[in-house]
Image (cartoon, rainbow, N blue to C red):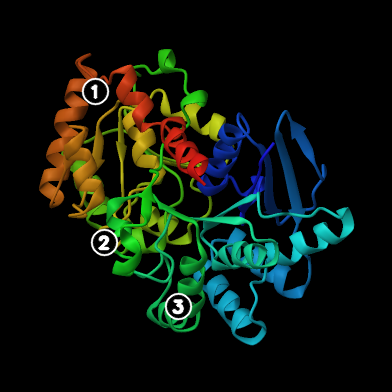
Amino acid sequence: MKRIFVFSYHGKETYQTGFNRLLSLSEKLAESYEVHFVYGNKNKVERPIKIRGNLIEIPLSYTSGFFHNNYKKLIESGKRITAKFLLATYFFFTGKEIFDLGREFDNYKKKTNINLDKEDVILVSFPSIAIHNLGYALKQEFGCKLVLDYRDPGVFGYQQIEDNKILSFLRKRFLKRRELRNLKSADLIITISESIRTLFPEKYRTDISLVRNGYDFKKINFHLIKHHPYTFKLVYLGTVYNDQLQDTTFFKALRKFIDTHKVQPQYFQIRFIGTGESLRLKELIKHYNLEPYTYISQKMPIEQIYTELYSAAMFFHLKYGDRKEIITTKQYEYLAFQKPILLPVNDHGDLEESIKKYNAGFICENEEEIIEVLKNSMDNHFKGKPARINRTEEELYELSRQGQEEKLLKLIEKL
């Protein structure tokens, strides 16, 4: 049976969308191939290997040391910019990432005598160019087929989330040559949107296939999506980055909406689900006196997160600064839960396009429009006329991660 090796920088303990996506992809591929899903773990691995049919999970504990522990603490405390500076400095002096899955996998190979061959397929997923470099190195060593997956555009296109200009310059200056080398070596390149595809060098664009993000169809019980008659829940899903909080229009509008219409917190809640630590978000909530109305949960398994979404009245986005090419997994999850979506400040990009394409909600340009949307939606909610955007089974499957994985499976079969 042909083998596929899937590599993820992030491990299970991070609750990252990127990890969940690659796990789901590995499960799909394991229906037809023997799949080795190799991922890094910042914590000590309790079970070094897990086998489910053709799927072999191999979590590898990252080396623990001074730089590793400090980097981990910075990330966990929400000081991501400082953490990225440490990461860049370490890379500049050593040429490696602090958490280096390539090194850990090399150690694993030596201890287990596992060998790859030219019939194997390697799938490596950005973020972390080190993972793409690992894929390149394995292809050079064993002659495997190489699949490069981009959820972000790598060194091309927009400045990475929460990179400042210096970090972005250093990334493009020192990593571009390796990125081009990896692209040239790839047998298949995939990315999640047409917008990101156009950011790559022109010579590669026609060779890049689209496999979009999607929600996890297997983990939603559509019968549990309901109307919560007593509270209007405005829900945000996932991490909030500082770049998303540069524009404070949404928070100003919330305060004005609450004050103008004398809204009480038992009737109106702003819920950040699976968001984790964000010092800037907490500062804004405190600054606009939104504490009684706001709930922030830690990162958690996707099954637990989905239980929080069933009774939402409305979902919302926070645009990513000036970036127009970002379409996150949460958009597909919002669409799947079939409640209206609020884009408080227009991104004039992929989010606007998706909401319009699926007739999925509201796109605002200023505080007044946000307040009007919230007032009308809340009035209808308490009149027993909540908004629900029903979708067909075919549409829901097309939006799902599983539907997109069918496309990737066909692409890999051609290899």
Task: Give neighbour class at mark 1: few <14, some 14-19, many 20+ (Cα, 10 Å).
Answer: some
**Residue toward you, 403 or 277:** 403
Foreground tag (1 vs 2): 1
Residue position marked by numbered label 3 in the rendering? 176
Q: Helix, strand, or loop for circle 2?
A: loop
Of marks 2 and 3, which one's residue comes earlier in the chain?
Answer: 3
In the picture, measured across the screen, residue 182 lies left or right of residue 338, that is right
Q: CA distance from mark 1 to mark 3?
A: 43 Å
For the question of whether residue 216 can be seen, the reply is: yes
Residue position marked by numbered label 2 in the rendering? 247
Of marks 1 and 3, which one's residue comes earlier in the chain?
Answer: 3
Question: Which corner quadrant of the image does residue 86 belong to?
Answer: bottom right
Tag 3: residue type?
Answer: Lys
Q: Residue at x 21, y 54 (%)?
A: 349
Give the vertical position of 330 relative to 178 (above or below).
Answer: above
Task: Give neighbour class at mark 2: few <14, some 14-19, many 20+ (Cα, 10 Å).
Answer: some
Tag 1: residue type?
Answer: Ile
